């Protein structure tokens, strides 16, 4: 009912309608709740508030809740300086809001657009809501500008194309573009769109193959369902893919050249590389990550990580640099490291061992996984690298897998047994799990030097023993029996006399021959024989580890 009348706007007689329209002016408030608008009635109302300076309708507070607009509703270029409320309105013939400006809150909750909904070039200066709206034909927000803190498309249904090309959210700070639980039934593309804050696609559904192109600070796809192949082309965004449901291959890739305008806050950043923060509880067999930053990504809890495809240059984190000085100085081997290993190491062990590792974020609901879980993650990702012919990545993740096995000290019978941990400690110390040739060669050098020293002290005799012939004198014509014997090597010189260049050269020759050629052929004391045997064993082991590490380095 209109104030002062017994009927609504649609049921006024011609005289009453003319009287009402004569009271309107540009910027006037309109109360048309529940009114059914014919094309002529809507045109008469908009003409009454048309600004002669611009030629476009100018409305103050516009209340169109539960209104029905027969045929196509034409709000082209309209300006709303007050609240614009279209909740539960119906547009059987579609609506054209091209170039419109909403200066305050705009609400289109539960609106049904049976025809197209065209908001091309529209400007929303404040918050806007299309919550639970239905676009039965197509929706166009091309080049639309959102300047408020939130644009809410939660639980909206897009049965046709959903066009957001070059749409952007210019508000800085904690702004959100919300598509939570929205349904895209046939849309083939979403974007390119830009948001200086957060794009929320949580539990949205994409029923058809789709390409999503986004430039944003954050992007949340928690529980998002992709029923067709999808490509997510991201610029700057930190993406959370936790619990995403992938029915077909989904590619997440960094997009260095965003197709539309970029908010100033993002454009100032030196790089447009996107990052993935989590793939927890995702079936990674259908996931492809290309040129993305994975330095903060959580992998534990994902399924089929061994089938994950990593293409291009995907960045992982690294251990802290430099030496941490303490009672036991610590220096970390350079390699690719998971963010979850950072979190675990930052909260366990000695103070010097924790320094430099990134702690788990405060207030997070997820507890950092321990070594037992990380062993599985490293092993599966190593398999993914091997299948992708990425030998350097596979080697780094093999190192991480062995590190977590060595650190698994659970006492409930499920951890790595103590004997196995000691073997892993030795394997790590001698050659870095067969991956650090320099470490194996250093130990080989130390072992050779120690063997040379031991031989000079206890293994080499004073001089090489000479054969001695002994026998008994016989009568003429009788046979003579002679015994040829070599006495045991003897070492009786003083300690100081055992160190000279001649003995050093001889000891070095014994070591080289025993390690490389397997037989020295030198006369040694009893202790020297045992020293040579030990040198053969350790030398062969260390040489094999060094060769293994070199082979791995060459393959990488």
Image (cartoon, helix red, strand yellow):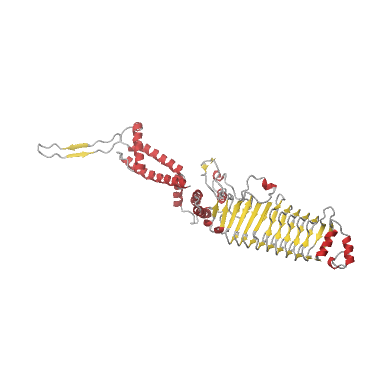
Q: Can residue 449 be seen in this view?
A: yes
In the image, residue 327 above or below residue 37: above
Looking at the image, residue 423 sits to the left or right of residue 105; the answer is left
Depth check, front residue: 505 or 526? 505
Q: Which residue is located at x 10 percent, y 39 percent? A: 478
- Looking at the rendered image, the quarter that the N terminus falls into is bottom right
Where does the image place residue 54, in percent across and percent down from the top left?
82, 53
Q: How many marks on residues?
A: 0
201 left or right, relative to 334:
right
- Residue, x 52% and y 46% (percent of image)? 335
Q: In which quarter of the image is residue 227?
A: bottom right
Viewer-nearest residue: 43 or 462: 43
Please state the horizontal and vertical placement of residue 128, each as a whole percent of the image.
74, 57
Residue 161 falls in which quadrant of the image? bottom right
Q: Out of 146 and 241, give the one closest to the viewer.
A: 146
Frontmost residue, 107 versus 37: 37
Which x, y percent locates residue 198?
67, 53
- x, y percent for residue 515: 36, 42
Rendered view: 368 above or below 540: below
Q: Which residue is drawn at 87% across and 59% down?
A: 24
Quick check: can you spot residue 242? Answer: no
């Amino acid at each position: 009912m209109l104030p002062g009348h017994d009927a609504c706007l649609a049921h006024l007689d011609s005289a009453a309608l003319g009287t009402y329209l004569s009271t309107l002016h540009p910027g006037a408030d309109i109360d048309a709740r529940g009114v059914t608008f014919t094309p002529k009635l809507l045109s008469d109302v908009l003409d009454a508030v048309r600004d002669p300076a611009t030629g476009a309708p100018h409305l103050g507070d516009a209340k169109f809740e539960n209104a029905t607009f027969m045929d196509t509703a034409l709000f082209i270029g309209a300006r709303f300086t007050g609240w614009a409320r279209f909740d539960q309105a119906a547009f059987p013939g579609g609506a054209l809001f091209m170039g419109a400006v909403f200066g305050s809150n705009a609400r289109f909750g539960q609106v049904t657009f049976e025809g197209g909904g065209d908001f091309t070039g529209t400007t929303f200066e404040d918050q806007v809501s299309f919550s639970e709206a239905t676009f039965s034909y197509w929706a166009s927000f091309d080049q639309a500008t959102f300047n408020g803190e939130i644009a809410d498309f939660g639980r909206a249904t897009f049965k046709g194309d959903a066009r957001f090309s070059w749409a952007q959210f210019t508000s800085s700070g904690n702004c959100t573009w919300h598509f939570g639980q929205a349904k895209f039934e046939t849309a083939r593309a979403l974007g390119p769109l830009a948001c200086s804050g957060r794009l929320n696609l949580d539990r949205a559904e994409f029923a058809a193959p789709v390409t999503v192109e986004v430039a944003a600070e954050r992007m949340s796809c928690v529980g998002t369902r992709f029923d067709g192949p999808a490509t997510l082309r991201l610029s700057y965004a930190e993406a959370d893919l936790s619990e995403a449901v992938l029915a077909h291959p989904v590619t997440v890739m960094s997009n260095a050249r965003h197709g539309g305008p970029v908010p100033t806050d993002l454009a100032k950043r030196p790089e447009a590389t996107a990052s993935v923060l989590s793939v927890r509880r995702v079936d990674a067999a259908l996931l492809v990550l290309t040129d993305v930053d994975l330095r903060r990504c959580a992998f534990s809890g994902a399924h089929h990580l061994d089938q994950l495809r990593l293409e291009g240059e995907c960045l992982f984190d690294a251990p802290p640099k430099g030496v941490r000085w303490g009672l036991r100085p610590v220096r970390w081997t350079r390699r690719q490291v998971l963010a979850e290993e950072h979190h675990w190491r930052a909260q366990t062990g000695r103070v010097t061992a924790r320094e430099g590792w990134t702690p788990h974020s405060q207030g997070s609901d997820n507890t950092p996984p321990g070594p037992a879980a990380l062993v599985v993650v490293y092993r599966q990702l190593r398999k993914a690298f091997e299948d992708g012919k990425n030998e350097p990545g596979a080697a780094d993740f093999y190192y991480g897998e062995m590190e977590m096995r060595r650190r698994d000290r659970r006492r409930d019978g499920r951890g790595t047994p103590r004997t196995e941990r000691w073997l892993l400690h030795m394997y790590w110390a001698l050659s870095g799990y067969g991956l650090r040739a320099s470490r194996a060669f250093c130990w080989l050098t130390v072992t050779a030097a120690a063997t040379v020293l031991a031989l000079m002290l206890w293994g080499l005799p004073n001089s090489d023993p000479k054969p001695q012939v002994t026998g008994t004198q016989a009568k003429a014509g009788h046979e003579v029996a002679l015994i040829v014997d070599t006495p045991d090597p003897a070492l009786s010189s003083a300690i100081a006399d055992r160190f000279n260049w001649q003995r050093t050269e001889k000891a070095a020759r014994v070591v080289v021959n025993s390690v490389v050629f397997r037989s020295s052929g030198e006369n040694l004391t009893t202790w020297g024989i045992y020293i040579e045997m030990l040198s053969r064993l350790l030398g062969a082991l260390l040489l094999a580890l060094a060769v293994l590490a070199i082979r791995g380095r060459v393959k990488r």
